[in-house]
Image: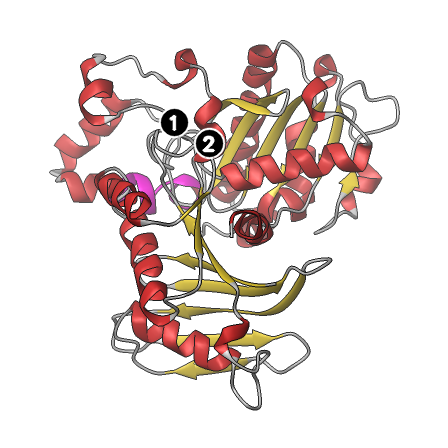
Amino acid sequence: MNVLVLNCGSSSIKYQLLNMDAQPVLLAKGIVEKIGLASGSFTYKPEGKDKVVIEQPIADHTVGMDLILKALVDSKQGVLKSLNEINAVGHRVAHGGEYFSESVKVNEEVKAKIRTLEEIAPLHNPANLKGIETMERLLPSVPQVAVFDTSFHQTLPKKAYIYGIPYEYYEKYGIRRYGFHGTSHKFVAEKACKLLGWNINEKKIITCHLGNGASITAIDKGKSVDTSMGFTPVAGLVMGTRAGDLDLGALLYIAQKEGLDIDQTNALVNKKSGVQGISGVSSDFRELTTASEAGNERAKLALEVFAHNVKKYIGAYTAVLNGVDLVIFTGGIGENDQPVRQAVCTDMEYLGIKLDKEINSRTRSTDAMLSTPDSRTKVMAITTDEELVIAMDTVRLS
């Protein structure tokens, strides 16, 4: 069974084609970028063949999807003989609100609910829905599945998701903590328990998905009970360009002093803050590390703030869970940035964490036990694969 996995943004489409017959096999992947702009870009990389990059205007998502499908069946670079070999399409959908606690097969009712959530996820849900509707036109007989970033966190107890504002805003507008990166948090927790031979229903786990967007989740007996992102993905940790937790009074003060309107204030906390805002250098941790080693004090500070934030949330979620058996690092930074992992795990002996510094220093993009044998709390690096999760759910529901 061949599954096409799509992650549609407002001006981009990330895609993978996987064969799910036995062990999952990646057949091709790529990205469509700068949709709707004067100069678009299409990248296609079939497994075992050369990468293809085409620079051309890409008017809309339909044109972008059409490029993907034509590449997959191209006589020279294609990996399929015909589009009939695509058996299902899985879509990453950012926000499922309180409607969806698990992945679902797409129908008119599902699309209508995704559309109603556009108001609280204006940057993501419209593009996700556009991807679904475009594929319905291009592959009308192929089943489609929606996999939601938020669904894993629908097990949060009410005390964990209600904000300290008038309750009427939850009732009127659905203002509450939703959480994101759910597919990744669920996947790495289950994967780690499988590797350890543990029953996840007996364990307390803290998963740290650390990338340009970053979040931490407390998992008790396989269920999310608290998570750092909130109503939007700007809450929680200091991230690449997102502010994370911020005193709202400070934000109002800045907006007043700088004369910022709502859109400018939104751009400030989403696109101009985080480690980029602190450092003035970059949101890329590799560049921050280089700058820090060269003596840039603000780059060094940005890295320290980030690690401090992660450590603080691990401590908080240990309290929420009343203990912790395993801490997992995943995502681009979590899987590859050894100094960040070491900084987070330093001075955590009270929590039973003892990091094996040698193993940590050589662990990149692989699954590994990072703690010492006598560490009461285990620490692991686990590679995530959100596209595989989407493909697996798509197979299950098709």
- In percent of width and height, residue 239 lies at 45, 40
- Going from N to C along the chain, the mark reached first, 1 or 2, is 2
**Residue at left offset 45%, top offset 76%:** 69
Between 205 and 154, the one nearer to me in the picture: 154
User: Which residue is tagged 1?
Assistant: 245
The correct choice, above or below, for 70 with respect to 275 in the image is below
The correct choice, above or below, for 110 with respect to 32 in the image is above
For the N terminus, the image quarter is: bottom right
Residue 237: give its label. Answer: 2
Q: Is residue 248 magenta?
A: no
State whether the magenta stretch is mostly helix, strand or loop: helix
- In percent of width and height, residue 32 lies at 41, 70
Specify the amino acid type for callout 2.
Leu
Label 1 crowd (10 A; few <14 / some 14-19 / many >=20): some
**Residue at left offset 31%, top offset 22%:** 247
Specify the amino acid type for callout 1.
Asp
Q: In the image as oriented, which residue stretches furthest toward the right?
A: 373
- Which type of secondary structure does the marked residue at label 1 adopt? loop
- In percent of width and height, residue 109 lies at 29, 43
Between 208 and 143, the one nearer to me in the picture: 143
Q: Is residue 269 magenta?
A: yes
Examine the rendering and report whether any part of residue 203 can be seen. Answer: no
- In percent of width and height, residue 149 lies at 44, 40
Q: Find the magenta span and give its range.
A: 267-277
**356 relative position to 209: left or right:** right
- Which type of secondary structure does the marked residue at label 2 adopt? loop
Q: Are marks 1 and 2 in contact (CB under 8 Å)?
A: yes
Examine the rendering and report whether any part of residue 114 can be seen. Answer: yes
